[in-house]
Image: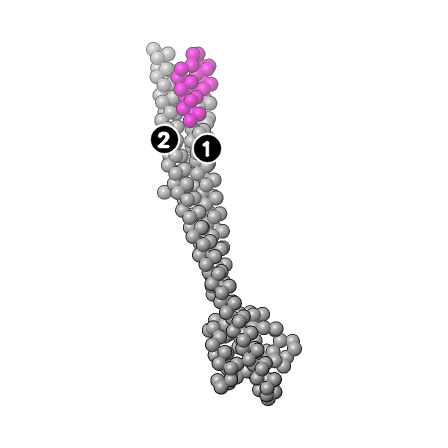
Amino acid sequence: MAEESRNTRFDLVVALFMALAAVGTAWAGFESAKWSGVQANSYASAGADRAEASRAATLAGQQRGIDVVSFTAWLNALNAEIVADPSVRPKGNYKPNQQAVSGFLFERFRPEFRPAVNAWLATHPLINADAPATPFDMPQYRLAAQRRSERLVDSAGKLAAKARSANQRSDNYVLTAVALATVLFFSGMASKANGRRLQLFFTILAGTVLIGCIVTLALFPIQI
């Protein structure tokens, strides 16, 4: 009677181990799939941000080219006017003459370029040898498209890091599921083993691995 009672308790323990291992395996599989989804979405978003960053960088390059061409044309026109009439040479802040080619070109600078030009002219570059060489050397020369490109590149980097982290977490859950499979194996061996010592050995082994897996799953981040 005592032996039968002992066998019944043993069977219940083995059944409990196998049930917990099955539930843990299902949970690990579910979480692995969820983290794989986070990885895929993050990589997709990172790719979209990189593509948009490339477009923004291209636009910034085009705008910079327009600024360089328009500034060069204005400077050449102003120089021609100064050569023709030295009195035209500005002694202080430049005031565009609408009747002159230089004034016509100046008024057509891009609005985003104008603050840098005004800041550069405030240094009296035509009479001040220490002034910055061009408006492009001024801190006021900032392209919104370039800043947007830089923000998108930074965002893409963070999303890629998030994807790598999600991939690692998914792999960790898969590894835990593999460990839980060994719990099922050891539990099965315990139920089939001959001899109390061998049964106890496999039962303790299954219980130890199971406890380790449960603790590990409890510490893993959860994605719902």
Image quadrant of residue 6?
Answer: top left
Sequence-first disc among 2 and 1: 2
Please say if 26 is above or below 132. above
* Residue under pointer 1: 175
Front one among 8 and 66: 66
Of badges 2 and 1, the one in the foreground is 1
Badge 2: few (under 14), some or many (20 or more) residues near its Cα, within 10 Å? few
Residue 29 in the image, given as x and y percentages of width and height: 39, 34
Say which element carries label 1: helix
Image quadrant of residue 74?
Answer: bottom right
Please say if 94 is above or below 166. below
Three-letter code for the amino acid on which mark 2 is drawn: Val
Badge 1: few (under 14), some or many (20 or more) residues near its Cα, within 10 Å? some
Image quadrant of residue 82?
Answer: bottom right
Residue 23 disc label: 2
Residue 16 in the image, given as x and y percentages of width and height: 36, 25
Q: Give the range drawn in magenta.
A: 181-204
Residue at 49% over, 75% down: 109
Q: In which quarter of the image is the N terminus?
A: top left
Three-letter code for the amino acid on which mark 1 is drawn: Leu
